[in-house]
Image (cartoon, helix red, strand yellow):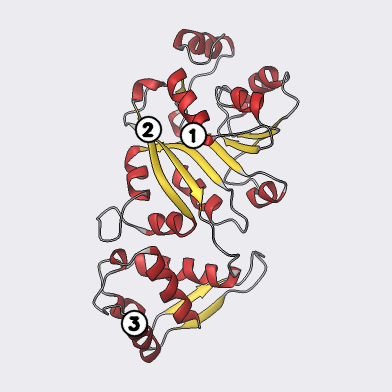
């Protein structure tokens, strides 16, 4: 049976007595052309180790397994586990994790050799999953994912645009983001109520950064964008920024007080107008401002 043929997908679901659940974001990809574009965009080779999130019926897992040296695929829905184990038993290079990606130790997966992520992300938690992945200590070299079209548009927005937000900033800190293809709702079963996008994220070539500085950057920008209608001078002067200096959850948070004199000095040093609002600064400006304030 072909997983890119709607009648076959319906037959498989009926055979296993499974009804797609909207709460799990279950919209199974059934379009062979879109599947091919995803595989081509990901550029997985025989030496790659790839992570798939939301295996579904295995439509993406199987072609990945035919190319990659190793594929780790995660599926949250326990109803699909027996089906996937049956379909994937012919692929010894596939590791099925039966669990929630929001609970999986992705840091351990990346340390184990995973370098690429290829996934049809569930609409409900797609953004949250992306944040976890791109903030990893050693993030993957490339992510090729399907996302809700309006979410993808935010991730490629430019400073000053209404779509430029916190997630945009965090993604663009470490990745170059590009939309590869707009995907019609009819390419999925059941068809979602919105269009999707194939988004490709390629990690920027950057020197190894300091974990403490990066955590401060995330905390500072999260604090600022929570008050994005205000000017930076109002937001940051006198602010207390709490952040962790390491990956260990047991570590106590550090609290950094930003006094007015130092904040204004940083603005002068970097040529930033104190009246600027958070979404008007680009990634590099935010990175330099965070470094100046942390110093």
- The quadrant where residue 87 appears: top right
Task: List x then y, in percent, for residue 64.
Answer: 61, 28
* Residue to which mark 3 is pinned: 267
Which of 96 and 36 lies nearest the eye of the viewer?
A: 36
C-alpha distance separating marks 1 and 3 = 40 Å
Q: Residue at x 51, y 55 (%)?
A: 204
Left or right of 44, for residue 20? left
Confirm or deny contact between disc 2 and disc 1 (CB under 8 A).
yes
Between residues 26 and 282, which one lies in front from this camera angle?
282
- For the residues labelled 2 and 3, the Cα–Cα distance comes to 39 Å
- Of the numbered discs 1 and 3, the one sitting upstream in the chain is 1
Camera-near label (1 vs 3) is 1
Q: Residue furthest right?
A: 92
Q: Which mark is residue 86?
A: none
Query: Callout 3: few (<14), some (14-19), or many (20+) C-alpha neighbours within 10 Å?
Result: some
Pointer 2 residue: 181
């Amino acid at each position: 049976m072909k997983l890119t043929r709607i009648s076959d997908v319906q037959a498989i679901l009926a055979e296993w007595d499974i009804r797609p659940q909207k709460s799990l974001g279950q919209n199974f990809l059934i379009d062979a052309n879109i599947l091919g574009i995803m595989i081509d965009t990901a550029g997985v080779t025989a030496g790659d180790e790839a992570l798939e999130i939301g295996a579904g019926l295995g439509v993406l897992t199987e072609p990945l397994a035919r190319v990659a040296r190793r594929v780790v695929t995660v599926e949250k829905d326990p109803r699909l586990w027996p089906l996937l184990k049956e379909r994937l038993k012919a692929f010894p290079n596939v590791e099925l994790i039966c669990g929630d990606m929001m609970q999986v130790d992705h840091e351990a997966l990346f340390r184990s050799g995973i370098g690429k992520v290829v996934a049809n992300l569930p609409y409900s938690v797609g953004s949250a999953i992306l944040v976890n992945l791109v903030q990893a200590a050693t993030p993957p070299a490339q992510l090729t994912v399907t996302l809700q079209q309006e979410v993808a548009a935010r991730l490629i927005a430019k400073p000053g645009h209404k779509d430029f937000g916190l997630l945009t900033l965090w993604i663009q800190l470490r990745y170059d983001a590009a939309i590869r293809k707009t995907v019609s709702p009819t390419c999925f079963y059941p068809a979602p109520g919105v269009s999707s996008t194939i988004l490709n994220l390629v990690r920027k070539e950057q020197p190894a950064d300091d974990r403490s500085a990066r955590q401060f950057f995330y905390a500072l920008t999260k604090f600022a964008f929570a008050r994005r209608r205000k000017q930076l001078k109002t937001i940051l002067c006198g602010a207390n920024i709490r952040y962790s200096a390491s990956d260990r959850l047991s570590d106590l948070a550090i609290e950094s007080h930003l006094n007015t004199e130092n904040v204004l000095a940083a603005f002068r040093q970097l040529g930033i107008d104190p009246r600027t609002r958070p979404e008007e600064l680009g990634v590099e400006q935010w990175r330099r401002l965070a470094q100046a304030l942390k110093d």
